[in-house]
Amino acid sequence: MTSFPTSAAPSAGANDEAIIAATRRWVDVAVIGLNLCPFAKAVQVKGQVHYAVSHAQDQSALLKDLARQLLALADSDPAQRDTTLLMVPDMLEDFADFNDFLDEADALLERLGLEGVLQIADFHPHYQFAGTEADDVSNYTNRAPYPTLHLLREDSIEQAVQAVPDASAIFERNIATLEALGLSGVQALGCFAPAALAPGEGESGKGV
């Protein structure tokens, strides 16, 4: 994932460049910089990640946008577009609502006949694993500046897992990395804040 050459959706609004830039910074600094996903750098170098922004404000509109992105990914040459990050800045701010929507997203995948072909991973600014406190640093393994749906090819996942030793231990290594930094250290990275925050103001900065 990131610093990838990319294009926004054709209907992108005026803020899309900032939304994409904030997401790319998160991937650069956290996902690749902390090696939270050892598969990410390869697709970055090859320019195979597509960024899209959905300005949907209700579930029906978001499902339509998601369907378009799923079908586009399935129809694309993996050498050109291997994965898609779909950011949703205008709804699903509440993590519980986002979590509920994931069931609808998986049902859509099945209706489109893409189950077993693609899968949907998820990131959220307020991601919280069951049994953890909101400020538990482990939650940052799945936090991002915006509610984000990560569309992946099953074949690519299988190939990546086979190429990485001890892939099953990635999550545990990520937790150890974040715990070593500590909550203040992770927040000081400044890459989990949405574009509304001025650069350098970190997670508690004021909007511009």
Image (cartoon, rainbow, N blue to C red):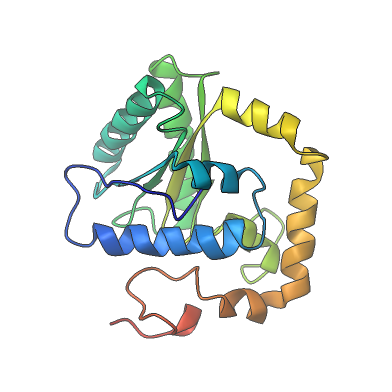
Q: Is residue 126 visible in this depiction of the protein?
A: no
Q: Is residue 71 above or below residue 14?
A: above
Q: Quadrant of residue 42?
A: top right
> Residue, x 34% and y 51% (percent of image)?
88
What residue lies at 63% left-to-right and 57% top-to-bottom? Answer: 141
Instruction: Residue 173 in the image: state x and y as whole percent.
Output: 79, 55
Answer left or right for 142 relative to 56: right
Quadrant for the C terminus, please: bottom left
**Where residue 161 appears, x then y in whole percent?**
71, 33
For this rendering, which residue is in front, 101 or 122?
122
How many numbered discs sit on the rendered protein?
Answer: 0
Q: Position of residue 204 (x, y in %)?
A: 47, 83
Is residue 19 left or right of 113 when viewed as pictured?
left
Rendered location of residue 48, percent (x, y): 45, 38
Residue lying farthest top?
113
* Residue lying at 58% horizontally and 46% vertically, measured from the top left: 40
Instruction: Pick the residue in front: 91 or 148.
Output: 148
Residue nearer the viewer, 96 or 40: 40
Q: Nearer the viewer, residue 56 or 20?
A: 20
Can you tell which quarter of the image residue 154 is in?
top right
Answer with left or right where residue 176 lies relative to residue 204.
Answer: right
Q: Please, which residue is most extreme toward the front here?
A: 45
Residue 106 is at least partly visible in this image: yes
Q: Residue at x 48, y 29 (%)?
A: 106
